Structures are given as C-alpha cells and as structure tokens.
Image: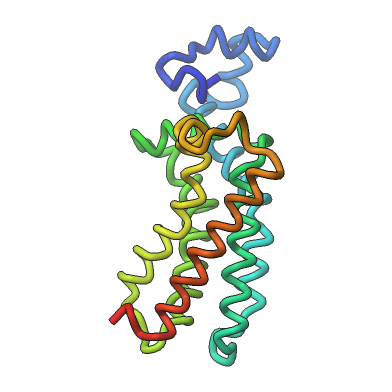
Amino acid sequence: MFGRVGYDGASTRAIAAACGKPMSAITYHFGGKRGLYLAAAEHIAAKMSERIAPLRAIREGVDLDNADFAVIEEALHRMIDIGIGVVTDPAIDDFVNFVLREQAEPTDAFQPIFEGVMSPILTQMTTLLAAAADPPMPEGEARIRAAMLIGQIVFFRTCRAAALRHCGWAGIGDAERQEIAAAAHSHLSIFLSGLRRGEHQ
C-alpha cells in the first residue's frame, strides 16, 4: 500500500483493514505508522538482497590481484545477465513503486534499501571496471561508468512504460529479455575494449 499511494496516502486504518488486523496491531508490533514504513523498507531490502546474492558470489570469486582481463570480463558479463533477470522479474513488482518513491524523495527508509541492495551492486561493478582498466582508471570515473552501465538495464524497470512504448513491446517476456541482454552485452564489450585501449585516459 505504501508503494501504491505513498506514506501520506496510506492510513493506518486502511493498512489494518487490508491486512485483516486491528489498528492496534500496528502500534503493538511497529510502534506506529512510521515504524511500519521503516519495517517495510527493511523487508524490501532483505528480499532484494537475497535476489542479488549471486552478484556478490561473482565478485567474491574473482581474485583481483591475480585475475587477468578475460576473467574480469566474464564476471562483468555474468553480472549483466543476473541484473537483467532481476530487473525484469515480475516478482519484484510489489517493491518497485516503494523504491521509486524513496528515490524521488529519500527518507530514512532509503538507507536500508541503498546499503542492502544498490550499494553492493554499484560497488562490485565499480571495482571490476577499475580492475579491467589499463592504465588504471580514477575511482570517481569508475563509479560514474558503473552507474551508467547499470542504468541502461534499470531503465527497463524504472521507466518501464516508456521502454515498452519506445520498443513497441506489449510486455517483457523471454524474447524481449534476450534482446535487452544482447544489447547490454554488446555495450559492455565495446566499453571494455575501450578500457583495454586506454580510451578512458
């Protein structure tokens, strides 16, 4: 309900009625509406953290001190595949509006979402991109490039209606997901080739 109508629009009466619980249950378990809202954010962060666990495993499996470019490149492409799978999964529909509202007007509820979901992905992508660059890339530039690479995928979730209309799709199924993946992998390959040629200097 917070995702659909926002914090101000969701009354405790309506929330309790939707859950089939008395209003007093909100105060008893969460201390009030604000506590419930923060608990919802933490729940979303925990669930999404489970979904991105494979991304953490990819980064942890790369020894940056000894990995060659091919290993890093493979890890980045695997991150793209997993990211597309998560972003286009209808199972996260219930979370999206809540997260988008917090993106637009961050409150203290944004912290668990950022720290539990967004920051790990951005940090891992940044680290791998920096490791792939030859000569080394400044951390600030690596952060920007990581955000841009991830942003091209996230667009299909955060701007779903625009993406569907622009691409002439009715929805995002297996065929559309494959098209998104092909384009994202192509962009990543071109970008990595540029890193190897020192075009980031």
Q: Is residue 52 above or below residue 98?
A: below
Residue that extends furthest to the bottom in the rendered view of this protein? 66
Q: Where the N terminus falls, by quadrant?
A: top right
Residue 62, x across and y down, in percent = 62, 80
In the displayed structure image, the side of residue 75 where residue 124 appears, left or right: left
Residue drawn at the location 58% of the way across and 33% of the way down = 169
Above or below, comparing residue 87 to residue 192 in the picture? above
Q: Which residue shows up at 60% across the image and 55% down it?
A: 181
Note whether 119 is above or below 169 in the view shown.
below
Along the viewing direction, whichever of 84 and 64 lies nearer the viewer? 84
Q: Residue furthest front?
A: 168
Q: Report the side of 65 relative to 106 (left or right).
A: right
Please state the horizontal and vertical placement of residue 60, each as a whole percent of the image.
63, 74
Picture layout, residue 48 above or below residue 168: below
Using the image as rendered, state which of residue 113 and residue 51 is in the foreground. Answer: 51
Residue drawn at (46%, 52%), measured in percent from left and top?
152
- Percent across and percent down for residue 159 are 45, 36
- Viewer-closest of 149 and 5: 149
The residue lying toward the viewer, choosing from 102 and 79, is: 79
Q: Position of residue 36 (x, y in %)?
A: 54, 26
Count up the numbered dots: 0
Q: Quadrant of the C terminus?
A: bottom left
